[in-house]
Image: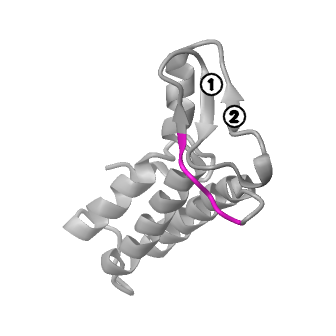
Amino acid sequence: MTADLVAFLRQRLDEDEAAALPFRNPLGEVRPWRCDEIGGKVREVGPSPFGLPDVISESDTHLTAEHIARHDPARVLADVQAKRAMLPHLVVEGHPLGYCDRCMCLRLLASVWADHAEFDPSWKW
């Protein structure tokens, strides 16, 4: 049913948002992260408020740091906002979950959480 899938999506987006929000800085901002050109340090972009250190994370490899920086809280929050904005355009009240374009878009959005315990295998696309 479409309503179940949409509820599942909303819950996952809420969880992603909740995981990203604690990374707001003392000014309440969530700024992008970047990794150093060499090494495994991930830094917050922009001036550091109140002289706080800008290093967010350190890892053993540049690849790990690059991965961490690519999934920074600012990007996660933007992703959540974009997906939430899409949902009203994809949901038709009372429409059963099928294989129309809108339903396929919902299924595709949910597919990133296919390993989640609450994911219904019937939602697979």
Query: Is there any visible trace of residue 57 in the rendered image?
Result: yes
Task: Kindly check if marks 2 and 1 are in contact, taking CB atoms under 8 A apart as contact.
Answer: yes
Label annotation for residue 41: 1
**Circle 2 residue:** 55
Q: Please determine whether, in this image, residue 28 is positioned above or below residue 76.
A: below
| Main SS of residues in magenta | loop
First in sequence: mark 2 vs mark 1: 1
Q: Nearer the viewer, residue 58 or 106?
A: 58
Classify residue 77 by image quadrant.
bottom right
Query: In the rendering, at what x and y percent does residue 2 appear?
Result: 42, 72
Magenta residue span: 28-33
Measured in 3D between alpha carbons, the distance from the residue under mark 2 to the one under mark 1, in whole angstroms, is 7 Å
The residue under the point 56% across, 45% down is 45
Type of amino acid at the residue the image marks with label 1: Lys
Query: In the rendering, at what x and y percent does residue 80 appear?
Result: 50, 62
Query: Is there any visible trace of residue 100 in the rendered image?
Result: no
Query: In the rendering, at what x and y percent does residue 100 appear?
Result: 21, 67
The residue under the point 59% across, 45% down is 116
The residue under the point 78% across, 60% down is 26
